Image (spheres, helix red, strand yellow):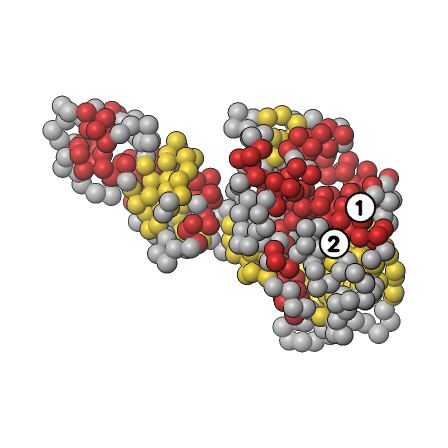
Amino acid sequence: MSRHRGQADFLVHATSEAEVGWQVASATLEDGWSRRAAVISSPKSNTLHTSIQLAVIGGGPAGLRAAEVAAAGGVRVTVFDAQPSVGRKLLVAGKGGLNLTNSEQFEHFATRYTGPGQPAGIWHDLLREFDADALRAWASGLGVATFQASNNRVYPQALKAAPLLRRWVERLRRMGVGFAVNHRLTGIEPGAPHRLVFATGEVVSAEAVVFALGGASWPQTGSDGAWTGWFKTLGIDCHALVAANCGWRHPWPPEVLASADGQPLKNIHASVSNHHVTSELLITRYGLEGGAIYQLGPALRGMLEPAITIDLKPTFTHAQLVAKMESVRRDFLDAARVRWRLGTAAHTLLARRVWHDAGALAREVKHCVIPLDGPQPVAEAISTAGGVCWHELDGGLMVTRYPGVFVAGGMIDWEAPTGGYLLQGCFATGTRAGRSAAAWLQSGD
């Protein structure tokens, strides 16, 4: 395939709201970092032109992994990032210990990845190329030992991201990978070569490009989802970015929050339609948070009137619960709190009504329905769903209409629950994109 095919005769530019030449904004990250972002409506007249072999746009886990794999294949790589340093979302993940991957059985692991239009078996192939064992071995090669927790989640022994990121960047530099930070992409012209315009005024010509700009969660780290507009203008189909792995809203009455705000519902069974999970939930000031609702998010998003059904005592049948209350004639909820070992959150949910018999109370325990008003905002989500549609990509994650343009990580329309699957997905797609870009460059197509 010719590299000239698919060349656009226009340049896609990000414009400021007022459509002026320059607009500078500043923001402060939680850890005290600061950044300055510039948006331009047209490149500066005194632009600096640079030519490179492979440009990786985005210095998150997927982008850095793509750069590493391509460099190992003999490609000259430069990583561009809008922030003053790379890997900021990885550092945010490190605040929770940096859950790198999960050690569960492979066939089940691959089913954790969902999204509309996914090619059959795509995640089996992607994960086989760089699976959980490979990720742990990769970390070990950086001198970062990992351990498996009782829930199969895998973490660095230090429970920190900074040492791993520092050693990773050092390795990339030794491999010859260049870094251009404070480079916010503002224009794209696919072609042969591809032209990339940055807010610095620099225009870069690249033989191939890997885009790894992430979704739209944690925008303070740089992944604001602005790229979706550019891609759509280029004719690349993208689904809207929506919140995934996020809390859902429910208007708790003040008396519930007074005693249950921040309290967990442990060892519960939750369901939405025909989807069932066993996990935990947390009552929050705005609604519900936690692993159970993260996993059920895709099903909830498909409901006109979203609601979650909770079995507060999944290890007991209705009849068994009633049997434990056979001698109780009054104060049913108080007795159930002791006999059924109800936690604070569960007791508070049940206290919203007055109970006159054990049977009705047991039915509520086994089938507690909580209607939901909607998900939390995208910016507050752990991750997002949506992005580049799978039918736009070939098996190497190259945009078929623009040869030499590849996509990795959260820019592709997939989602997975928390538990190590998100980072593993970024590493796996970064591996495929980096390897495919190197092969494409070396093939001379």
- Residue 181 visible in rendering: no
Q: Are marks 2 and 1 in contact (CB under 8 Å)?
A: yes
Q: Earlier in the sequence, mark 2 or mark 1?
A: 1
Q: Residues within 10 Å of mark 2 (few under 14, many from 20)?
A: many
Label 1 packing within 10 angstroms: few (<14), some (14-19), many (20+): many
> What is the secondary structure assignment of the residue under circle 1?
helix
Q: Is residue 83 left or right of residue 296?
A: right
Query: Which residue type does callout 2 highlight?
Result: Val
Q: Residue furthest left?
A: 329
Q: Give the CA distance from mark 2 to mark 1.
A: 10 Å
Q: Which residue is mark 2?
A: 210
Residue indicated by mark 1 = 70
Q: Quadrant of residue 223?
A: bottom right
Question: Is 46 placed above or below 119 here?
Answer: below
Which numbered marker is on residue 221? none
Quarter containing the C terminus: bottom right
